[in-house]
Amino acid sequence: MKFKLLSTLLALLILPAIVFGIDEQLSLSNHVTGLNRTGDNSATGESNSSLHLSALQSDTYTVLQHSRFPNHRVRVKKTLFCDPTVNVYTGYLDVDAGAKHLFFYFFESRGDPDKDDVMMWINGGPGCSSAMGLLMELGPCNIDMNSTSVNGTLWNPHSWNQAANVFFLDQPVGVGFSYADYGETIQTTEEAAKNVHAFITIFFETFTQFGGRPLHLAGESYGGRYLPVFASEIYDQNLVARREGRQQLNLKSIIIGNGNTGISSLYLGRYEIECGTAALEKPVQSITNCVRMKMALPRCQQRMQESCFDMFDSINCRAAVTFCDSEISAGMWASGRNVYDISKMCVGNELCYAEVSAIKEYLDIPATRKLLGVETSNNFTSCSPEVGANFGIHMDKYNTPTHLHVAGLLDRGVRVLIYAGTYDWQCNWISNKMWVEQLEWSGSDNYNKIPWREWTVRGRVAGEVKATPLLTFATVRGAGHMVPHDKPEEALAMIKKWLQNESL
């Protein structure tokens, strides 16, 4: 696929990053226009400088540092990428004293950027770039699959920045444009959580226009593991900030789409999707394979319960997962169907969507990389097998059941939205429904008593929903793993309602 960028964009080259002079704390150079000096508060580690985001330049990075995070810094610049109707920014979170570099995109809201909530979107994998969500799902522009545009993308009227200011973060290193200087890796979700907390804190305390804004962490797939842990880190650090009289992040909710959260019910759900009618009117799997799966399910569940959940044992848990995959998941992987949308056959690469290859090609165009301010010479990585393997070595998905974090967040007043497309097999809605119903938290009895009901968008039934003031579960009919890709209007309507704290 050949993409053409606007001649004006071709002229916008990213000069070598110019690092402004750094004072202590959240310091910025006096050369930055519009800099608003504030009082020094060294005892608490608060910022002694603030800046309005719109004051940033487009030809150089502005560097942000913070005394409480000596091994982290944020570099950010304005750019003309993707959405011409709003201010757009890109940059890096440098961690581990500058040895690792996490790339991010930030799009101001199309509504009221000075008042609207802030959302961070993170794709799963583990090891998939959030540029997939940006250019294929909920971002301000979609990859142009038919080469009809002049710059390779098409404006998305159903972008979630219709309702919020939105970050897209490529994490951990090795994903998207994120990279490490010396081959360092992040191997656990808990490690990544500390970096996310530092990033948001530095950003919010520098650009004080965001101070106190409601913050929502959103994502899909392995985001079901990431987001509850990230949110828990933010909540726990807020407790420290409160004790020390410092500013807190206004964490309001987590939003998980087709998440890999409740591993204990994953295989039961997969059986129902391919051997039952939970997704399509007729089962897609052969009778022979379904019988084999049915026979293996009790042993699969027992082994996982004993070795992964009751008492985690790395060797035995890995053996249990291997057994479950070979006996229950192998048939679907061999079928040629799209495991993220079983109503379709797999196309393109192993992720089964032609858009994935097109996004990689587009983001590897030199002019696109210069526009974004990409520093690494590495090619863009849609999904990194190496990152996935690193997390797999540590059994990150199994060693700490993430639904426990969800329960802890709910009991502390953080709202949780779980949504799921009904055609997904990989992280299916049946599995999500099961773990949500089995969740142990103070509002569980009330949640389970509430009946399911249909929710609609412009008079059309979009799915089913069950909701309490803190916990909502919504299905999206006819959508696969990537709901905003398959049902963009319904997805945006759902998010708008959620951010306004209104019922679907």
Image (cartoon, rainbow, N blue to C red):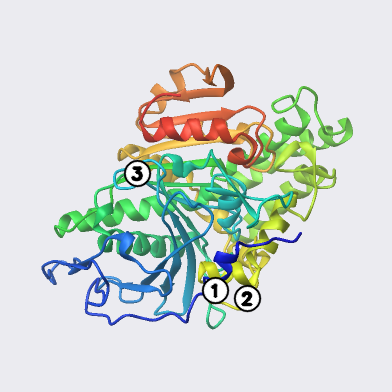
For the residue carrying disc 2, how many other residues have a C-alpha within 10 Å: few (<14), some (14-19), or many (20+)? few
* Location of residue 95 by image quarter: bottom left
| Position in image of residue 164 (x %, y %) | 40, 43
**Front residue of this view, candidates 126 and 21:** 21
Please tell me whether residue 7 is drawn above or below residue 168 in the rendered image: below
Residue for badge 1: 179
- Give the structural element (helix, strand or loop) at label 1: strand
Instruction: From the image, tell me which residue sits under label 2.
Output: 378
Please state if 483 lies on the left or on the right of 74 as rendered.
right
Q: Residue 52 placed where, x, y %?
A: 27, 60
Side of 179 where 117 appears, left or right:
left
Q: Secondary structure at mark 3?
A: loop
In the rendered structure, are the residues bearing label 3 and label 2 in contact, judged by CB atoms less than 8 Å apart?
no
Whether residue 97 appears in this view of the structure is yes
Q: Are marks 1 and 3 in contact (CB under 8 Å)?
A: no
State how far apart marks 2 and 1 are (Cα). 8 Å
Residue that mark 3 sits on: 117
CA separation in Å, label 3 and label 2: 34 Å
- Mark 1: few/some/many CA within 10 Å (<14, 14-19, 20+): many
Q: Is residue 220 left or right of residue 271?
A: left
Residue in the image at 87% along x and 33% along y: 286
Would residue 501 appear left or right of 380 to someone viewing this image?
Answer: left
Q: Are marks 2 and 1 in contact (CB under 8 Å)?
A: yes
Amino acid of disc 3 = Asp
Q: Earlier in the sequence, mark 3 or mark 2?
A: 3
Residue type at mark 2 is Asn
Name which of mark 2 and mark 1 comes first in the sequence.
1
Q: Quadrant of residue 341?
A: top right
Could you tell me which quadrant the N terminus lies in? bottom right
Front residue of 37 and 446: 37
